[in-house]
Each structure stands twice: as C-alpha cells, then as structure tokens.
Amino acid sequence: MATHYNSPICLDKYNTIPISQHICCRGENTGAIYDASMKIYEVQDFIELEVGSRKYQLLEYHFHLPCEHIVCNEHNPAEIHYVFLEEDEVGKFRRGNISPDVCGCCDTSDLAGNILVIGRTIRHDVSEIDDLEKFPVRFPKKYFMYDGTLTTGDFAPVRWLVGRDPIYMNVLDIAPIAKHARATQNEDGRIILYVRSN
C-alpha cells in the first residue's frame, strides 16, 4: 500500500535544511549470498551503521538501472541501495519471516518503520568489479535524509539517506543483476535534511 511520501525524488541542497550528524560504519562484507529471484545480495556478516544515536544492521544490498534518485540535477546510469534494519534491543521485532520486497529474514509489516536505506548513485567507470558478493558499504560524508518509501514491492515506509556525490562502478557489470527503476515521485512538501557527517 502506497503512502503520501513516495520515493524516489529529486534532491538538491538548496531546498533542504542543513544539519551536522555523526555517522559511522563498522564491520566487513566477507561474502553476501546472491538471491537471483529477488535480485538482492543477502549479507551474512554483522555490519553496523550508527546514525546519530540510532544503530542499524545491514540486511541486503541491490542495484537499480537506471538510477532512481536525481541528485543535484544529475541522472546517473545506476544506483545501489543498502538496506539496514534498526537494531532491536528490546525484542519487539519478529525474525524468520518472509518479505517479498526487502529480504527473506524480516517481515515488512513489523519492520518497515525501522528500515533505513542508503542510496548511492553510480557513474560509469571502465574498471571491472572483482566480486560483487564482497562489495563494501560506501557510506557518504554528505547526504540528503528524508522519509519516503521502498521503491519496489508494497512501497512500505522507510527513511532514506542518499549520498550527494556518486560512486564509480562499471555499469555493464551490474546490468544483468540490477532491478528496474521506479519513476521519480513528487516531493509533496516534505522536509529534506542536508547532512555533513562528522
């Protein structure tokens, strides 16, 4: 079921509220498992993202072709999404359920409000990618943060963190395993933060 604030959207720092925020990532991706039916890489390692006072664990990452977010008037050829779940210190989330649009280890109805997605647009680079199963989290130092939705499945609500600057990858290497892109949605007057991490 769609919500009022849909994703993806166009992002430009001139229509945002600037803030500073602590962000760091711990852990290493030593070998995610690719699920061809869902076109996602399910992460097997404990990789933790700390954003302000909240902590999240990386569940999966996947690619879209072309990119979904338009950042500073640039529409790059691809985009990667890292899907994180807020860490559950009080046991309020169920595990072991199946979600058709996030991954096989969580139930969207329970978890969607506690999901954070890092989006990075991708510019083409001719260098070949050695191993997508071990692709690292490339979190941005400058990024936009807003409330929106997943761009596939039931468009459940999530918090987005979209890098201002693109990363560089060989788009030809990811084309066979990339998902389609959803069209850009209306901003609908929502608040968008522009963050410089420290």
Image (cartoon, rainbow, N blue to C red):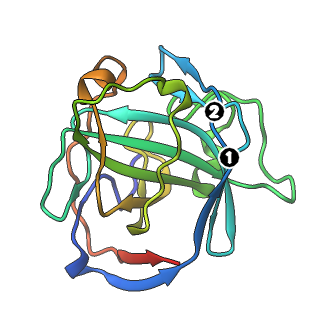
Height in image: 109 above or below 18? above
CB-based contact (under 8 Å), mark 2 and mark 1: yes
Q: Position of residue 28 (x, y in %)?
A: 65, 42
> Label 1's element?
loop
Q: Quadrant of residue 109?
A: top right
The one nearer the camera, 66 or 159, is 66
Tell me: 142 left or right of 57: left
Q: Residue at x 71, y 36 (%)?
A: 45
Q: Position of residue 191 (x, y in %)?
A: 36, 77
Which label sits on residue 125?
A: none
Q: Quadrant of residue 123?
A: top left
Q: Residue at x 47, y 50 (%)?
A: 138
The residue labelled by disc 2 is 43
Q: Residues within 10 Å of mark 2 (few under 14, many from 20)?
A: many
Tell me: 73 left or right of 115: left
> Three-letter amino acid code at disc 1?
Ile
Q: Residues within 10 Å of mark 1 (few under 14, many from 20)?
A: some
> Label 2's element?
loop
Tell me: 78 left or right of 104: left
**What whole-number distance in Å separates the C-alpha atoms at marks 2 and 1?**
8 Å
> Three-letter amino acid code at disc 2?
Val
**Which residue lies most toward the left here?**
73
Which label sits on residue 47?
A: 1
